Amino acid sequence: MAHTRPAEAPTQNNLPEIPVFDVGPDFAIETARLVGRERTYAMLDAALAGVPLYALRVADAISRRCLSAHQSPYLPELDQLASLSTRPGAYFLNLHYEWGCTTAAKPAMEGTSARLLRALDWKVNGLGRYVVAARITSARGPWVSLTWPGFTGVLQAMAPGRFAAAINQPSIRKRTGVLAIDWVLSKRDVWRSPHMQPIHLLRRAFEEAPDFSAARHMLESTPICTPAIYTLAGLRASDVCIIERRETSAGMLLNAVCAANEWQTPEWHPGHHSAFENARRLATMETAPGLLDLKWLHWPILNSQTRLALAADPAQGHLIAQGYEASGPATQPLELILAR
């Protein structure tokens, strides 16, 4: 499905709320149980529509083998999630993801704190409709992840009194110049790598990092199995950064506060396929004020593949989020204020 402008939005009052669940460290399992099988299976059906069951079983087997090779600390959790399901797809959805995003970490308009602005684009139906907010209790303090039942990674989250962060996926490296072949080669690299998934590294940062500096060091230096772009916002207005990551190296963007899906590190930039409206999305996000709202969300940041929008201030512990589908808003806006 190509990117297009979203349709006219339905009446906000007719939309469902984003469910909020209070859970512990095993939040992927707990949210799946709290949501219930009917909603979890509805999301899986929407996300995997048209994929034959035999293909999903093969994809699950390959995905699990890959996670085992990575020595993923979250594989036992995924095994348990798969055992709770009567249909395949759990491993596949936790490993083979393809998304586009536009993200910013910038000072608040008042200049007293840092804020994370985030739009997640993913051409998977149902993600906006079935998004949940998991309020997670952990040893480092509470944090909240905007996630989905059975998803073990973290794509965007906020830890009040520590930091907020999100992950973008860079476009595929150019090797042959043929997108389909380069896509296969990129997947081969993931299967062969011994390193952690980027979405699991971001989860570990929220579980273990006590502050912005520790999270930044972890996201910069920990080897990962495939390239990623991390956006990080701390407590002070100056605590903002974009971290562009290859498997064992990092490019720090000290003068950039926005990220999309193409490298901004100069020496990396020519070596990838182009992403949808990358320059326009960056320019639009750069002009967005550091306000805690979703008024910055419009074309081309908002498009038919947008599934979630978020604004977070970790110093205030304040978060606003809303789910989207191709037709427009899919949930009512969610506003959370979390104590440290």
Image: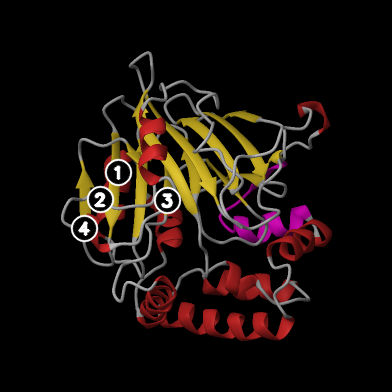
Q: CA distance from mark 2 to mark 4?
A: 21 Å
Residue 145 lies, in percent from the top left, at: 55, 45
Look at mark 3 in the image and give the residue it sits on.
167
Judge by depth and name the residue closer to the eye, 69 or 21.
69
Residue 32 in the magenta stretch? The answer is yes
- Reading the chain from its start, which is encountered first: label 1 or label 4? 1
Local crowd size for mark 2, using a 10 Å CA cut-off: few (<14), some (14–19), many (≥20): few
Question: Which region is colored magenta?
Answer: 19-35
Q: CA distance from mark 1 to mark 4?
A: 15 Å
Residue 267 lies, in percent from the top left, at: 16, 56
- Reading the chain from its start, which is encountered first: label 2 or label 3? 3
- Reading the chain from its start, which is encountered first: label 4 or label 3? 3
Image mark for residue 298: none
Q: Are marks 3 and 1 in contact (CB under 8 Å)?
A: no
Q: Are marks 4 and 3 in contact (CB under 8 Å)?
A: no
Q: Is residue 219 above or below residue 282?
A: below
- Reading the chain from its start, which is encountered first: label 3 or label 1? 3
Residue drawn where x is 59% and y is 42% of the image: 308
Image mark for residue 268: 4
Local crowd size for mark 3, using a 10 Å CA cut-off: few (<14), some (14–19), many (≥20): many
Q: Nearer the viewer, mark 2 or mark 4?
A: 4
- The residue tagged with tag 2: helix, strand or loop? helix
Local crowd size for mark 1, using a 10 Å CA cut-off: few (<14), some (14–19), many (≥20): many
Image mark for residue 242: 1
Identify the amino acid type marked 1. Ile
Look at mark 2 in the image and give the residue it sits on.
217
Residue drawn where x is 73% and y is 67% of the image: 49
Local crowd size for mark 4, using a 10 Å CA cut-off: few (<14), some (14–19), many (≥20): some
- Reading the chain from its start, which is encountered first: label 2 or label 4? 2
